[in-house]
Amino acid sequence: MSFAGPSLASGGKTVRRAIEFGRTYVVKPKGKHLATVVWLHGLGDNGSSWSQLLETLPLPNIKWICPTAPTQPVTVFGGFPSTAWFDVGNLSEDAPDDTVGLDAAAAHVANLLSTEPIDIRLGIGGFSMGAATAMYSATCFAAGKYSDGSAYPANLSAIVGLSGWLPCSKTLSKKIGGDETARRAASLPILLCHGKGDDVVPYKFGEKSSRVLVSNGFQDATFKAYNGLGHYTIPEEMDEVCAWLTSKLGLGGRSP
């Protein structure tokens, strides 16, 4: 298992180390396939647990793809290896962002979506660190590129983030600029949900993430708060996700 950080090649050029992602779980649509959503788990989890929950949702027209993050040293765990989409030290205003790891994770997600039929609407969702990766993917979609400058290929129609945060929020205004970028940002629906009792990713991070997205042109961003909810999900929240996805992906009124 490889660490998703940069390493120096000869001449001082930064290169990306090989990253070995875990197993991917797929939940096939029970009805007509109209949309595909990649759903990303949180730190230390895997794709299996979320695939089992997503399979129970009343969304027969969605195909769910639930990958497993690479196992890599995580700074917040003192360097102990864990499944993680990118490295994270601590959640603070001044914490550095692992843009190399974020780019690798976002590229892996885009690659999973690349083989979907052209008429299928595409979305990315996630929980905690998975939500952070989904939000980062939204900024790459709007900018048309990753942080390393390479082109972002996926055409996204929806982003869902539960109990997460927006990486690289301080530099987002530099990333989002120009008429085409502004158009893509304004056109992308985003749903963020966060519990006010979250003691892992504090509520203020979710709320601020929403404000930063809106202030940078993501006009169709919705923020939902849940009193008493900790760092987990509840049926009420998943009901909200189902209704929102049905609306934003145009699934309502379609034949099952």
Image (cartoon, helix red, strand yellow):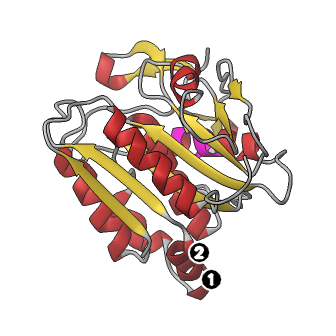
Q: Is residue 58 above or below residue 144?
A: above
**Would you say residue 31 is visible in this rendering?**
yes
Comparing 120 with 203, the one in front is 120
Mark 1 to mark 2 CA distance (whole Å)? 6 Å
Identify the magenta region: 101-107
Q: Percent x, y for residue 62?
A: 67, 43
Element under disc 2? helix
Residue that lies at the very extreme toward the bottom in this rendered image: 179
Q: Amino acid at mark 1?
A: Glu
Comparing 115 with 228, the one in front is 228
Q: Percent x, y for residue 34?
A: 75, 52
Q: Is residue 211 above or below residue 60?
A: below
Q: Is residue 252 left or right of residue 96?
A: right
Whether label 1 touches label 2, CB < 8 Å: yes
Q: Amino acid at mark 2?
A: Arg
Q: Dot 1, how many residues are within 10 Å of its Cα: few (below 14), some (14-19), or many (20+)?
A: few
**Would you say residue 98 is visible in this rendering?**
no
Query: How many numbered discs, if any?
Result: 2
Q: Which mark is residue 184?
A: 2
Q: Dot 2, how many residues are within 10 Å of its Cα: few (below 14), some (14-19), or many (20+)?
A: many
Overall secondary structure of the magenta section: helix
Q: Percent x, y for residue 183?
A: 57, 81
Q: Which mark is residue 180?
A: 1
Q: Is residue 240 above or below residue 155?
A: above
